[in-house]
Amino acid sequence: EYLHDIEGETTPVSLHVLGEPPREDLMVPFLTTILKHKFLDALGRVVPVPAADSRLPGDRVIYLRRKAEEAVELVVRRGLAPADAVAAIGGKVSDTLPTEVQKGLEFAVDLNQRFAKTTDEIDNILAAFDGRFIPPGPVNSPIRNPGAVPTGRNLYMLNPEEIPTKPSWELATKLVDQLLERSLKDKGHYPAKIAFDLRPHATFRDYGVMEAQILYCLGVEPVWDDRDLVNDVRVIPSEKLKRPRIDVFIAPGGLYALNLPGRLELLDKAIRLVAELKEKDNAVLANSERVRGELEQRGVPADRAVAWSRARIFGVPPGEYGSPGNSAYIQQSGSWTTREEVIEHYLAMAKNVYTKDHWGEAAPEAYNRQIQGTDTVLRSWSDHMTGPLASKYMWLQGGQLAMAVERMTGKKPDYLLSDVRDFDKAGVVRAEDALAKEFRVRLFNRKWIEGMMKEGYSGADQIAVMVANTMGWEVVREGSIPSQTWQEIDAVFVRDKLGLSIRQWFESENPFAFQELSATMLESIRKGYWKADAETTRRLAEDYARSVVRHGDNGGLRSGGNMPLRQYVERTLVNSGVRDLASLQAQYHARFEAPAERPAATVAALGPVPAPGPAPATAPAQGQANASDVKAEGEATSGKQAAAGQAAANKADATGSKSPPPPGAVPIRGQRLESAPPPGHRTQSVVPWVLTASALVLVLGGFFWRRRSA
């Protein structure tokens, strides 16, 4: 049944190209996915399923999916009427088709016509540049909201006051009941406290399932007005709720607080209502009283201690856009040594409370106490296009929240996902289970790999990103990536287990993606996340070093400026005892020591930039980013020259001195504006202008290369 489940999963096997509809060979499967399982169920009422294809529920779904694609093909490509198409695939058609089948096939025809308007994407971008009107349209994946097609319109999200919608509330109550029943069955008790990783993009997709889950855990329900807007909540009586109220801990990203502050205020109101209920077995009340007493003992003023004791929402300081513990820091793995450093980086930004009259104020004492007792972390999974492996945010945000819980409580919490990609099949799954499945659905799936290979350099980037996310998971959820997963990555993408000539493909399309992939694997070995044998380590170090020697360092997040990795690769090559590898080590080392070949005028135009090197301890993210900039544009000068030039410039700025820079330094100078030459005046040479133009082309080319690579 598990194998059938994997086979029945859908996954994107192509990347969108601006202004181009989905590929012809992928359009019919895509349209069938948009019709969802209700269409398949309805089709099953008129299309007999052979006994051989119905031994397991998974067999039946796969058979009906195949028949559905045949029917969609006939109405979309050949223009058959829905009834004729169903008859052609073996359906038993009476006077009328089931409504879901009739409307579904008509809808597929309509969607196909709307997808043909994807060219509007470019037309409307050009119209925007001209300051002309852009037709509005809703945002979302076409699978979630087919109204998003045609694309290329001026997107609008939603009215925040609609959150949560009634369908989202109904689904949320089912998901919470499912979670609580599973906990009661497996552990013999309900969760003590559930931490919610709250993100606005999930809200925009599922219209408030996570917000509704928070309310229902507390035993509170939304109050909809006559326009179905939610601006108030009310307590569900305990006799109606028929279970204890579950305490919560909420970690919204900075973007959530900026986009949906009214929803945070609503959640805060619900928490404060429950914290005041004098009910038996009210965990929210009990925990609030405990925290109030502890805060007062720590010297917190009484009024503030009361307010903080009823608060459950904590995040970044007001106005901050991102989340605590950004992905760049974790992926720049040469700038930190232990997991403890990673979680401290996260916690340094996470302890600001969001509650009435104390909105966004720093409250580390309250955070440290309110997170206690958390044994479950819950996050929404709302998008077909992404997943635990494809999206770094699954491990970056929810995973780091789970890591924070473990760090602060001493116990590793369950990390669960509310899988609401399809409302008809929604359920709560363990993050590690979803991750293991996605390895099979995407990264180790020959069909997906071949799809990425058709996408050229960008497809190679997608593969490298998923391998990078693999290490991210292991950093924040120790033990989530077993050794055999790393071995399979090595077998498929380095040793070409599937016979796809994938190494040659990386070499021709995007050797830098292969560098980042192999650097990630080496970093996982170096840091002890993968216990690879000596032969595997030596082979990976050789492959990585040869790529750097041949193409230069890619300057990626993982490898750019990563001195510990560089030293590890060199030691591995030297200690191998193989003469050729010792020679390779010298070439690899020289690749980082020698300045790149570039005309002096170009260097002067760009200005000095530090060469790749270890990230400064005080600002690792900035140091690494500079290293990436250098490699994207071509290395401008050696590290010593750049440092000397910068020091001279700084000294001149501070003192007004015009003393010359140290020998070999390239100073930074502004351009002096000169009056136009008189008519008939001949310029001395066009060479400086050509060199300046060349420099601009290189700079702009490097910028767009980085943007495309990202």
Image (cartoon, grey):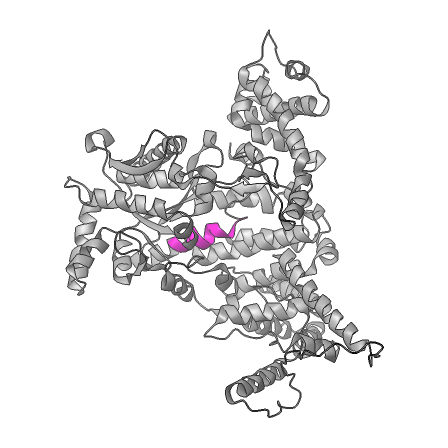
Say which quarter of the image contains residue 508: bottom right
Tell me, yes or no, if residue 55 can be seen here.
Answer: no
All told, the count of numbered labels is 0
| 399 is within the stretch colored magenta | yes
Residue 680 against residue 171 in the figure, above or below: below
Q: Residue at x 69, y 47 (%)?
A: 455
Q: Residue furthest bottom?
A: 659
Say which quarter of the image contains residue 132: top right
Residue 323 place in picture, x, y as percent: 43, 57
Residue 457 against residue 216 in the figure, above or below: below
Give whichever of 129, 470 is nearer the camera: 129
| Magenta part of the chain | 390-401
Residue 100 against residue 367 in the figure, above or below: above
Give whichever of 14, 544 is nearer the camera: 14
Residue 575 place in picture, x, y as percent: 61, 74
Give whichever of 604, 708 is nearer the camera: 604
Q: Residue furthest top?
A: 95
Look at the magenta stretch and give its main secondary structure: helix
| 31 is within the stretch colored magenta | no
Q: Residue at x 74, y 73 (%)?
A: 692
- In the picture, measured across the screen, residue 673 lies left or right of residue 234, that is right
Residue 706 place in picture, x, y as percent: 63, 61
- Quadrant holding the C terminus: bottom right
- In the picture, measured across the screen, residue 78 lies left or right of residue 249, that is right
Residue 515 place in picture, x, y as percent: 64, 62
